[in-house]
Amino acid sequence: MNTEVLGMYEKLGISKEVWEFGQNIEKELEPRFQEFDKTAEYNQLKVIHAMQENQVSESSLGTSTGYGYNDTGRDCLERVYASTFHTEAALVRPQITCGTHALALALAANLRPGDELLSPVGKPYDTLEEVIGIRESRGSLAEYGITYRQVELLEDGYFDYPAIKEAINEKTKLVTIQRSKGYQTRPSYSVEKIGELISFIKSVKPDVICMVDNCYGEFVETREPSDVGADMVVGSLIKNPGGGLAPIGGYIAGREDLIENCAYRLTSPGLGKEVGATLGVLPAFYQGFFLAPTVVCSAVKGAVFAANIYERLGYKVVPTASESRHDIIQAVQFGTPEGVIGFCQGIQAAAPVDSYVTPEPWPMPGYDSDVIMAAGAFVQGSSIELSADGPIKPPYAVYFQGGLTWPHAKLGILKSLQRLIDTGVIAKEVLTK
Ligand SMILES: *Cc1c(COP(=O)(O)O)cnc(C)c1O
């Protein structure tokens, strides 16, 4: 069996030494992988239960055009999301174009001029800076007279409770908490930690709305932020909950009145949830959500495998090889441009789509350095699919995520290592030391 598998790896350009190095690490990770499988099992049952409870039927998988009135499949899917996240309601739409849009929608729908938005977890995700107006931008919340306050994190990356208490005032209407670290160096937060933070905030001001940016976090744990007091959870369908099948979309799950506000903002006052044709995407939304728990599990295994490979080879990895996981992102710090470039080229070479192209760094709009990106995805920009990117600037770190299946994530990481060896960034000898 092993020689047969090795033969396939060799066909895909992996040497015996790289493969054996990977095999040894995978063996050591067996107990952890079993834990991830248990989480996936629980989450799979949770999703199936939500689908059964809401009587998903063949007709739910239908489509609508035009106004999209009486799209019962769409309404049923929103109930499935609400059941899964244990919320009163949800909005799950192809008209929500991406994660940033979903977050901007949730904010704009629930804030009014004179209100204040608070981030108690430091700087939010880059694209939110323009949504909020931290960086001046057309149509930002700031232009509508919504102010913003931010409390910096403590040294250890966790919450400065006294400063948060101080920052909450009579104008504070909504608090935004980002679960995943994104491209920052702070930790990603466990659902438990988020729950503690929300409890504290509500003890200071009970009627404040707590929203969680749930991007990259869905199904990594058995609980979601909505299980620990979040009033809204928000995310992208081309990340975890789309299961790799959703070709577009975003979701917001939460309290009924808040979700109604989102619907009236997404479509129009007076129309709300009643309109919004689904144009044939529902089968992908349902099936993607059904697959999401095991897809996320594959991605988490890939992240942990990468952390262990590169930590063993002496690189700084965040999270570390042994840390608990709260999202699907893995950072590896190479310290040289060649490291970042080689890693991304290896990931690209493992892709089912566009494997023959070689990514190069380029000056991307919105970034202050060249950036290299590897993505051989079925859905453009999908980061639940195996993907990696890194800015060509110190500390020369690469951010890696996704993998629809564990064998693909494993191949991608082995290909990255192979590439770094073939280009002389990593000496072959270190594998056998
Ligand atoms: C990806 C992401 C976003 C933005 O989502 P897009 O779909 O890229 O617009 C926001 N917050 C976090 C934490 C993310 O990871």
Image: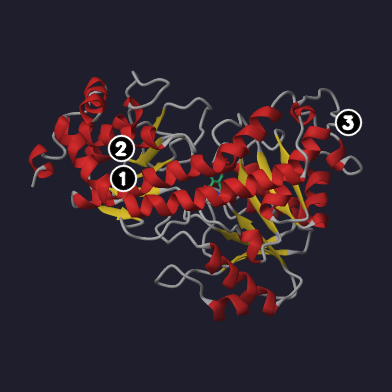
Report the side of 195 relative to 270 (left or right): left
Give the mark nearest the N terminus, 2 or 3. 3
**Mark 1 Cα within 10 Å, few/some/many (few <14, many 20+)?**
many
Report the side of 299 relative to 109 (left or right): left
In the image, 130 versus 94, the foreground residue is: 94
Total tally of numbered discs in the picture = 3
Helix, strand or loop at label 1? It is: helix
| Contact flag, marks 2 and 1 (Cβ < 8 Å) | yes
Ligand 1's image quarter is top right
Q: Mark 2: is the Cβ under 8 angstroms from ligand 1?
A: no
The residue tagged 1 is: 306
Classify 427 as above or below 141: above
In the image, 296 versus 37, the foreground residue is: 37
Q: Mark 2 and mark 1: span between their CA atoms?
A: 6 Å
Residue 368 location (% of width, % of height)? 41, 43
Q: Is residue 420 visible?
A: no
Give the mark nearest the N terminus, 2 or 1. 1
Residue 297 location (% of width, % of height)? 46, 45
- The three-letter code of the residue at mark 2 reads Ile
The residue tagged 3 is: 69
Helix, strand or loop at label 2? It is: helix
Residue 206 location (% of width, % of height)? 74, 75
Q: What mark, if any, has residue 413 been given in the picture?
A: 2
Classify 310 as above or below 150: above
In the image, 170 versus 429, the foreground residue is: 429
